[in-house]
Image (tube, grey):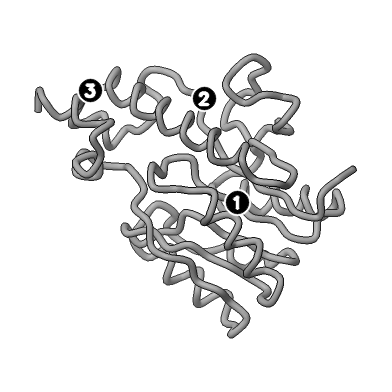
Amino acid sequence: MQSKNLIITFTRNPELGKVKSRLAKSIGEQAALEVYIKLLEHTEHVLRQIDCDKAVYYSVKVREHDIWDATIFKKHQQHGDHLGARMEQAFKNGFEAGYKNIVIVGSDLYDLKPKHINDAFKALENNNYVIGPAQDGGYYLLGMKALHSTVFKINDWGTNTVYKQTIEQLNTNSLYVLEVLNDIDYVEDLKSYDSFKQYLENI
């Protein structure tokens, strides 16, 4: 039986030289790949604890045998010329499949906990939208009860104004804001976590 709720995450295929490019400039491509794999494993562990349907969208190619168990996660290919278009298509797919509440979450947050996602779905009971701001000016989570395409048509994805632009596009009081979390993009972002201290030793 299908849940009314769907949690989506986007993932890059974990390949050397193709993930965490900004981080790799400081710690090297191999270390950046290892960090990214740890982040994916953390995200997978968090999402499997959520009582709802789950989907993972791959950047390049759907992988059949990886950490995303196909009996738990529905697997899809990302489609679109930029991040906004790809997210919009993922939400569209979910609503067309009959889901009532859809949340998308990033895959590079070591601070992410099941509570953040459960709180997001709870917020959608009384709000049309929910968002989780990131320290770098982006957002780590976005949820809605109906497709609002304008939030995906902002300029300059990957900059420190993404959260601000998204809030402006929503232009609504029916919005719940979660706590701010730190996603991991730069070497400075690793310093707060014991699990990543080993990658700072040779810098």
Position of residue 46 in the picture relative to residue 203 (left or right): right
Disc 1 from disc 3: Cα separation:
29 Å
Q: Residue 152: tell me if it is visible.
A: no
Residue 135: image x %, image y %? 32, 59
Counting residues from the N terminus, which is met first, the one under dot 2 or under dot 3?
2
Q: Which mark is residue 13?
A: 2
Q: Residues within 10 Å of mark 1 (few under 14, many from 20)?
A: many
Residue projecting furthest to the right: 1
Which quadrant of the figure has residue 138? bottom left
Which quadrant of the figure has residue 128? bottom right
Question: Circle 3 is placed at which residue position?
Answer: 28
Position of residue 67 in the picture relative to residue 124 (left or right): left
Residue 120: image x %, image y %? 59, 62
The residue positioned 51% from the left and 31% from the top of the image is 12
Tag 3 secondary structure: loop
Residue 44: image x %, image y %? 55, 33
Residue projecting furthest to the top: 65
Above or below for 82 versus 72: below
Disc 2 from disc 3: Cα separation:
18 Å
Tag 1 secondary structure: strand
Q: Residues within 10 Å of mark 2 (few under 14, many from 20)?
A: some
